[in-house]
Amino acid sequence: MIDIKIDRQGIAAAIERIARQQRAPLMANVAAIMADAVEENFAQEGRPKWQGLKPPGRPGGKILQASGQLAASIDSDSDADSAVVGSNKKYAAIHQFGGRTRAHEIRPRDKKALAFGGRVVAKVNHPGSVIPARPFLALTPGDEAEIEQTALDYLQRLVGR
């Protein structure tokens, strides 16, 4: 007969050290990795590439970056148990998930009328727009592997390996 004996004392001591340690530094590192990934998504116009702009589009303009406000609104936060990245912009969700805007009326802001295509009108009834999903809050497999390696390195330092 073969007896297998497991020294639970060493495992229990390692688990105890992990339980006592602050996890906040790990979560702060994870949040930073996620924020870098989102920044890279904007720089590369999606990973994978986002659906392009419909004509007339902005020649040379970057997708989701007409004013830069959405990219600038990206914020990260973390505590001992979580790491999050997001935006507080109202329109962030429709760009992330796609959807349809509601029909609405367009009126001039600073003039008495709107002029386009040789016509002058007081208002225009816009039927709404279909916005394709352009997920900017996304991680690539490489980003996920970096997070896993960061967590593994952290845990190995805790158990003294």
Image: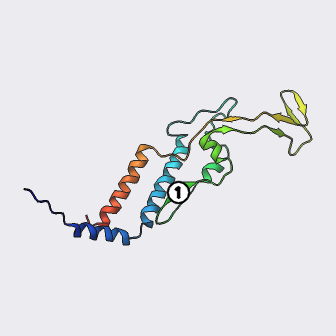
Task: Decide if residue 125 is in sight here.
Answer: yes
Residue 34 to residue 99: above or below: below
Q: Give the labeled residue for mark 1.
A: 84
Amino acid identity at mark 1? Val
Residue at figure coordinates x 65%, y 33% from the top left: 59
Q: Is mark 1 on a helix, strand or loop?
A: strand
Residue 28 spot, x, y in % from top left = 47, 62
Colour mode of the rendering: rainbow
Q: Closer to the camera, 108 or 134?
A: 134
Residue with the most extreme front position:
1
Mark 1 burial class by Cα count in 10 Å: few <14, some 14-19, many 20+: some
* Picture quarter with the C terminus: bottom left
Q: Closer to the camera, 118 or 46?
A: 46
Residue at figure coordinates x 87%, y 45% from the top left: 110
Residue 95 spot, x, y in % from top left = 63, 42
Q: In this rendering, would 30 be left or right of 74?
A: left
Which quarter of the figure has residue 15? bottom left
Residue 109 spot, x, y in % from top left = 86, 45
